[in-house]
Image: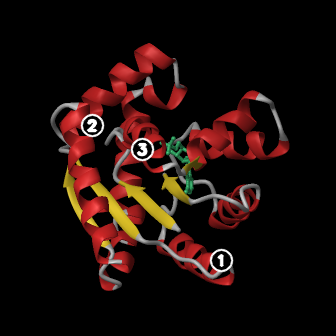
């Protein structure tokens, strides 16, 4: 299986690049943010709980997020692989994901981390807020808190994959196609080795 963690701060382009990668490599795209938003829209218990964190730009607790992610993976027993977008966001989530995938005789192949300067992220998110109406993208205070949470709680999860030799940083500034090429280059180089 080809299991990729697409990593990076909010606004780095994970969703945009995931859409292109799933098509090229025939993978299942799992975005925990999208799943939370789906639940919020349908006013489920999970959605109500998630909303109380998302509206502040905080992380939804690990246990809730991990259980939800595992249930999603279970829905695709025949998948050729997954793109995990927005998960893991803590080292605890990364460890739980490893243990879970190991129980399925698979594991994470690569972590691809999109790097984008902070002021560019804020610009992109405010623009996305105008276009999509996502409430956590319209308020600059919430946006700045999400980036702070990323720097303080999420960025460290990259170390976990770095120690396993799976971490690859990718410059996330440029055209969508240029960035996509950079990601494909790493995936294809890796696929030649295995
Ligand atoms: P995203 O669409 O990935 O930017 O996620 C939107 C929001 O959903 C985040 O700001 C968090 O509040 C929540 N969220 C998404 N993924 C996770 C995760 N793996 N762990 C905790 N909270 C998450």
Instruction: Name, please, the residue furthest toward the right.
Output: 45
Secondary structure state at the residue bearing disc 1: helix
92 lies above or below 129: below
Image coordinates of residue 120 in percent, x first then y, are 20, 34
Query: Image point 49% across, 18% down: which residue?
Result: 132
**For disc 2, does the CB lie below 8 Å from ligand 1?**
no
Cβ–Cβ below 8 Å for labels 2 and 3? Answer: no
- Residue at label 2? 121
Numbered label attached to residue 24: 3
Relative to 158, is 102 on the left or the right? right
Q: Nearer the viewer, residue 1 or 168?
A: 1
Query: Image point 61% across, 46% down: which residue?
Result: 53
Q: Nearer the viewer, residue 82 or 71?
A: 82
Image coordinates of residue 164 in percent, x first then y, are 35, 84
Q: Nearer the viewer, residue 169 or 39?
A: 169
Secondary structure state at the residue bearing disc 2: helix
Instruction: Name, please, the residue furthest toward the front.
Output: 192
Dot 3: within a 10 Å radius of its alpha carbon, few (fewer than 14), some, or many (20 or more) residues? few
Rounded to the nearest angstrom, the CA distance separating label 2 from label 3 is 26 Å
- Residue at label 1? 100
The mark nearer the N terminus, 3 or 1, is: 3
Image coordinates of residue 55 in percent, x first then y, are 58, 36
* Quarter of the image that includes the C terminus: bottom left
The mark nearer the N terminus, 2 or 3, is: 3
Secondary structure state at the residue bearing disc 3: helix
Relative to 176, is 156 on the left or the right? right
98 lies above or below 177: below
The quarter holding residue 160 reads: bottom left
Query: Image point 24% across, 34% down: which residue?
Result: 177
Please state which of the two labelled residues, at mark 3 or mark 1, is closer to the viewer. 3
């Amino acid at each position: 299986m080809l299991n990729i963690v697409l990593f990076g701060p909010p606004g780095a382009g994970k969703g945009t690049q995931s859409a292109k990668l799933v098509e090229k490599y025939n993978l299942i795209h799992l975005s925990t943010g999208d799943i939370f938003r789906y639940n919020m829209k349908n006013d489920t218990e999970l959605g109500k709980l998630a909303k109380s964190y998302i509206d502040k730009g905080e992380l939804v607790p690990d246990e809730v997020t991990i259980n939800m992610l595992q249930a999603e993976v279970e829905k695709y027993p025949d998948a050729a692989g997954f793109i995990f977008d927005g998960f893991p966001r803590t080292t605890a989530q990364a460890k739980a994901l490893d243990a879970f995938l190991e129980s399925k005789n698979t594991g994470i192949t690569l972590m691809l981390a999109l790097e984008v300067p902070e002021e560019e992220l804020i610009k992109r998110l405010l623009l996305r807020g105008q276009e999509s109406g996502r409430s956590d993208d319209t308020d600059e205070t919430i946006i700045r808190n999400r980036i702070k949470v990323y720097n303080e709680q999420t960025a460290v999860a990259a170390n976990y994959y770095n120690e396993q030799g799976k971490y690859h940083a990718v410059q996330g500034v440029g055209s969508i196609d240029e960035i996509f090429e950079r990601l494909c280059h790493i995936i294809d180089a890796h696929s030649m080795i295995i």
